[in-house]
Amino acid sequence: MKILFVASECVPFCKTGGLADVVGALPKALRQKRHDVRIIIPKYRAIRGQEFGIKETGEWVRVPMGWGRVETADIRAAKTEKGIPVYFVNHEGYFGRPGLYRGPFGDYPDNGERFVFFCKAVLEACKAMQFRPDIIHCHDWQTGLIPMYLKVLLKSDAFFQHTASIFTIHNIIHQGLFPKTLLEATGFSWNEFRMDQFEYYDNISFMKAALNNADQLTTVSPTYAQEIQSSYEFGQGLEGALRNHASKLSGILNGLDQDDWNPSKDPFLAAPFDSDHLDSRKECKAALQKSQRFTIDPSIPVLGMVARIDRQKGVDLLAQIVTDLLRRHNVQIVLLGQGDDDLLREFENDARQYPGHVRISTDFNEPLAHHIYGGSDIFLMPSRFEPCGLSQLIAMRYGSIPVVANTGGLHDTVIQAGSTSGTGFLFQSGSAPALLGAIEQSLAMLRNSEAWTALQRRAMNEDFSWTASVSAYLAVYRKALGRSAKSPGRPRSKLHRTK
């Protein structure tokens, strides 16, 4: 199968969140199944051509942007370490900026126009590079117009006659909502500005365009797939559209890149370890305590958190219980993240008030993230909602036991610990007292070294590789193409193409 991944970010080239990890890892797993997988992203200023061996292809695309204006971009190319081709849409005006989506004063005001251009340029790049994908796998709102272009403007284009589109929702809170004045740039007519296409309260919604036009929809965990259809709280206004398309929506858990996250080979850790050699993990804990200027004492529990500092991640719930937790227990808390200024100030105040017990770091510090996973005893994820989450998967692989809210992908990946079973601790989402109770549960088990070691080993031996997820994605791809598992080579019928 020929598969084109389209996204606004991808590791190792650029990243603001988990989307980039998925776009970097899933193609590797698909390639191992002998599929022709390629990736296309914008060429941002931050992506250094020399570092990644990016070269000019000599191909250019012309993109009409409305009002008689045509923009051009050149297509550049590189390969990942695993040999996956990556294409870059290079346009200095749209992508030659300091940040991916925002500058020092907030979101770029022309983000809608930037990603209209990107969506159009991707389709033109397919033709320029003579790559006819069976599947165009689009990720998040920045790519949401592509399924609509395929269904509406390119429905008679022979080049894409046998191309199906998949759209993956990584976080429905980001929907790509822009004023209807953008319609001219999109190239769609006013006939398409309606509720069953991309009109949303008199605006244009990139994500709604994808929901209504993609051949198949996925999101990043089974529970989140149900949650986003259930209410406004989770669906953020698109729950009705999702219910309308429930038959084509699948929840598929993200996997974890086993090469990037491996405590037995992690160069950032003080000592390598695995589930059969947990004694070495004590060195990692001591190194973490030392780096945070904590008392180096193996008996003092270390609680870690690596997250965006905001309400979605439940960081405010942790802020509410820090004082009570420290009054009751001698623990050390280390946070790494950036985000809400008010919450950051709260934790900075806690760090000043409890200098031997609370530390917060707000820089982009990859080594410290690895130290926290490899050296903390307990890993906190009190999210109000969590589409999938990768941090709890990493924490388990590194032997840091997760305390998580019972929501989304956290519900699907963490099993409540008992005396001889389970992999972590769950609590009612949005409740600070419930968070405190779950932490105290974990601290009680931590005091039983034999039970705790067994819990760590169960967590570390969970299989969160991409293997199972790849099989699920391939089933979705075949469904989109109108294929059955018994006849993977059969093309889509004319009836399927025109639905």
Image: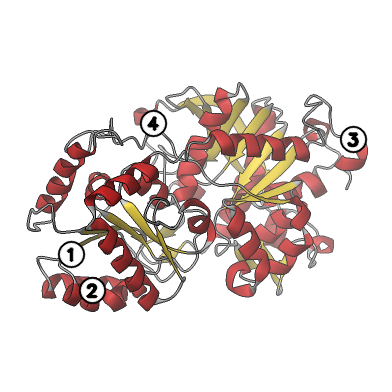
In the rendered view, does 279 fall on the left or right side of 178? left
Please say which color scheme the image uses: secondary structure
The numbered mark at residue 493 is 3
Indicate the amino acid at tag 1: Val
The image quadrant of residue 320 is bottom left
Give amino acid for label 3: Ser
- The residue where tag 4 is placed is 259
Q: Amino acid at mark 4?
A: Asp
- Three-letter residue code for mark 2: Leu
Counting residues from the N terminus, which is met first, the one under dot 1 or under dot 2? 2
Q: Are marks 1 and 2 in contact (CB under 8 Å)?
A: yes
Horizontal side of 193 relative to 112 (left or right) equals: right
Identify the residue shown where x is 18% and y is 37%. Answer: 280
Residue sitting at 86 percent across and 39 percent down? 156
User: Disc 1 designates what residue?
Assistant: 331
In this picture, residue 365 sits left or right of residue 11: left
Q: Position of residue 337 (x, y in %)?
A: 30, 59
